[in-house]
Amino acid sequence: MSNAARKILFTIYATYIFCGIATSQDQPGSKTKSETTIDLGVYKKEGTSKSVIANVHAKNSDGKFGPAKNARVNFYVVKGKEQELVESVNSDGKGQSTLVLQKDLPLDENNFMTIVARIENDSLYEDTDEKIHFREANLNLKLDPSDTTHLVTAIVTEMGTPGKEIPVKNTTVKFFVERLFGIMPAAEDNSITTNEKGEASFAYPGNIRGDTSGVYTVVVRIVDDEQLGNVENKATVSWGTTLAINRNPFPRALWEPNAPIPLIMTVSTLFLLVWAIYFFIFYQMKQIRKEEDIALANEQNQ
């Protein structure tokens, strides 16, 4: 084979390899995407709009699922047999995408709303979707600040077809107390099921600590209900035990920075006695040395 033929074959081979690499790099979907999951939850605080929160998790290089950052989540509302795009929201650093629900979104014949969260055509994450089906619910509180039994009644209702509120029975309501760093159960068993009137009553214990005026905040929640999602309401009451004010911020005690005066006097006296003994010993040694010098001088004069 001549040198010219070899050069032609080499050029064709090199071009083939280059084109193959370029094609593989430009081909969409050649990059491996992370496996992704979506968890949906509905949240409503009384007096605010209801929100749907999508928690997006993706598998990392270690094969473990963690929060998926900057994942574009498309939220759809189901209207009949169609799905209409409501909004697209990128996930934050915790992998959460939040959709604030509008009041005019469509409901089905049973007053249910269906929201679909979908990741699609994302360059980093695989396509996935999740659906949530829920009803609009209200959680109202009824209580008497002067009630010595500390009774709180939660009333759970939903909007009926004529536009009237209908009581929701057999729904679990939980009662909490708000604290500085979160909430804590008001009692070991803080769950009450609503009756046919949609009411659930709970008597708060009388030993709950309040502020300097005995005030604390009661928090009532419906948690992860299959039909109602998460609903919350709260109220401030003055049923707590009064937080005692320490009028002396720097008391004198053994366990405080300022020690009691008798202890200070005792320790000071002991120190003075020790130093007095030292001075007495030094004085006696000086007197002995002085007497020795006098005796030595008398011997030399004789």
Image: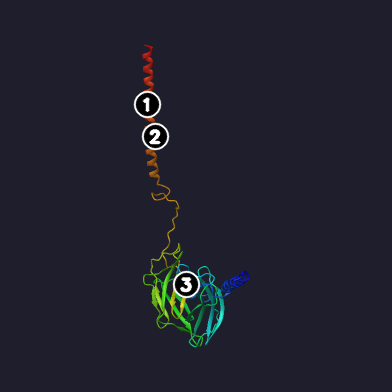
Q: Nearer the viewer, mark 1 or mark 3?
A: 1
Q: Quadrant of residue 205?
A: bottom left
Secondary structure of residue under mark 2: helix
Which residue lies most toward the right here? 4
Q: Residues within 10 Å of mark 1 (few under 14, many from 20)?
A: few
Q: Residues within 10 Å of mark 3 (few under 14, many from 20)?
A: some
Q: Nearer the viewer, mark 2 or mark 1?
A: 1
- Asked whether the residues under the numbered discs 1 and 3 touch, taking CB atoms below 8 Å apart as contact, a structural biologist would say no
Q: Is residue 232 above or below residue 105?
A: above
Is 296 left, or right, of 181 in this rendering?
left
**Mark 2 or mark 3, which is nearer the start of the sequence?**
3
Residue type, numbered disc 3: Lys
Residue at image coords 40%, 45%: 261
Residue type, numbered disc 2: Trp
Q: Which residue is mark 2?
A: 275
- Mark 3–mark 2 Cα distance, whole angstroms, equals 67 Å
Provide residue 203's location: percent of width, then percent of height: 39, 73
Residue type, numbered disc 1: Met
Q: Nearer the viewer, residue 220 or 261?
A: 220
Which residue lies most toward the top here? 302
